[in-house]
Each structure stands twice: as structure tokens, then as C-alpha cells.
Amino acid sequence: MNLHLTGKVAIVTGASRGIGCSIAKVLAAEGMRLVLVARSQDQLNEVASSCQNESLVHVADLRNLDGPEGVVTAAIENFGHIDLLVNNAGATKRGDFTTLLDADWDDGFALKFFGAMRLCRAAWPHLKKQRGSIINIVGVGGRTGSAEFTIGGSVNAALLNLTKSLADRGVIDGIRVNAINPGAILTERLLTRVKSYAAEKGISEAEAPLGMAHALSIARFGEPEEIAHMVAFLASPLADYCQGSIIDIDGGQTRTL
């Protein structure tokens, strides 16, 4: 299917691995030119070499106040315009609420929420010129609270609210703003938890994903490419009527309205 994305420019954060890497590859296959953002130069170079279209590697720590503005400046200097911003960067610490430190909370909000917010603000005038779009990769923890995911759930809930708020402004400025909530996706980060689960249950690492999925009452874990293909759809004119949409891709894990 032709998604009419050829030649357009996308910024993808957290692009060095996992979901971000898959998003980059799918968008490149659709003909988009990319600004790949993460903290690892070597990993970004590997992703760029595997993409099928022109890519700019930009190493940045989006927790820094000037990081997001630098990303947008680099994108404009290299490509002249921006059509899509994919906010994917950010991991938050799990653990017992009573033992999590203020520094853990500060770090959780610094990258995933404030980094995304500042990127949206910096990119907004350029996206307005192109009638572009923003896609926030958030997470189902923003909709369903969990005792071991208090930081992540709070950050995700805030980012979902920001998505709705910016979508409201986007109606005026011609920018579409949407969000995707991934569930349990088989990335390097989840594989670490799979290994721990296998050791705890005394089962093989091959058996562990199915057992963990069943514990969540879902049939299987998701693949990063399944998130990436939804990003490509939301970025395309086919999704022109999606504004403020929050899409759960979680195998049915989220059962609330």
C-alpha cells in the first residue's frame, strides 16, 4: 500500500534500538528521510546503515534543556523542513514505590515527558508549515495503574494528556497529534525481564515469554514492527481524520474503556 510518505522528513527519538529502530526502518522503507536521535553514536550508525533512505544521525541527551532544540535545528539545517515527529525515547525505573528516590522520579519525567514536550514545542512551527504530525509512543501503563510501575504510569498518563491537549491546539494549526500505547513488546528491555522470569520459575527462556503473556491474559507478546506499522499509518494521509487518537496495541491487555 502506498502511504504517500516518500520524500517526507521524520524525527525519530530513541531510534538506536527496540521500537524506535523498527519505526526508523519502516518509515525509511516508505521513502521517508530520517533524523535518528539517541545517546549512542555507534548504535545509531548501525540503524542508519540498515535504513533504505537518507538518514541523519544526531546524538543527543534529551534530558538536557538544549537537547530538543538542537535536534530540530539539525533537522532543518539538513533537510529544510519537518513533516513528522515521533517521540519514542524514554525508559522509567520500576520498583517498590516506598524505595524509589526523588532522583528516579526526576529522571523518569526528564526524558520521556519533558524531552517529548520540548521537542513538540521546538518542532511545532515547522510542523505547522508542513501540516505535519506528532506521534507519541507512550504505553498502556498510563491507562492502568500498577504497584511496580508508579513512575512509568505517572509519566505515561501525563504524556497521554499532553497528546490530547496538543491535538486540541493542532486542530487550529493543522498539526495532527496522536499516541500509541504499546503493551508487552519483545524488545531488549523486555528480554531482560524474560530472563529473570525464567530463572524465578525454573523454566527455559524459550518458555518464559508464553508464561508471562498468559499471566497478563494475552495470547503472546507483540513485535516492535507491529508498533512501527501503526506509526507509518498514523503519519500518512490515510489517517487524516485521526486527531488526539490513543491507540492501544497490547494484545487485549487493556480491558478498561
Image (cartoon, rainbow, N blue to C red):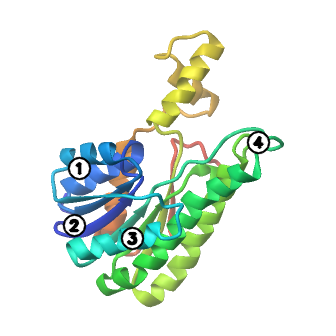
Residue 147, numbered circle: 4
Residue 100 is left or right of residue 225, and the answer is: right
User: What type is the residue that disc 1 sits on?
Assistant: Ala
Q: Earlier in the sequence, mark 1 or mark 3?
A: 1
Badge 3 marks a residue whose secondary structure is helix
User: What type is the residue that disc 3 sits on?
Assistant: Gly
Badge 4 marks a residue whose secondary structure is loop
Image coordinates for residue 87, horizontal then vertical, percent:
45, 61
Q: Is residue 183 visible?
A: yes
Which residue is outermost to the top?
A: 202
Q: Which residue is mark 1?
A: 48
Q: CA distance from mark 3 to mark 4?
A: 36 Å
Q: Earlier in the sequence, mark 2 or mark 3?
A: 2
Q: Which residue is mark 2?
A: 5
Image coordinates for residue 26, horizontal then vertical, percent:
26, 51
State whether residue 13 is above or below residue 172. Answer: above
Q: Quadrant of the C terminus?
A: bottom right
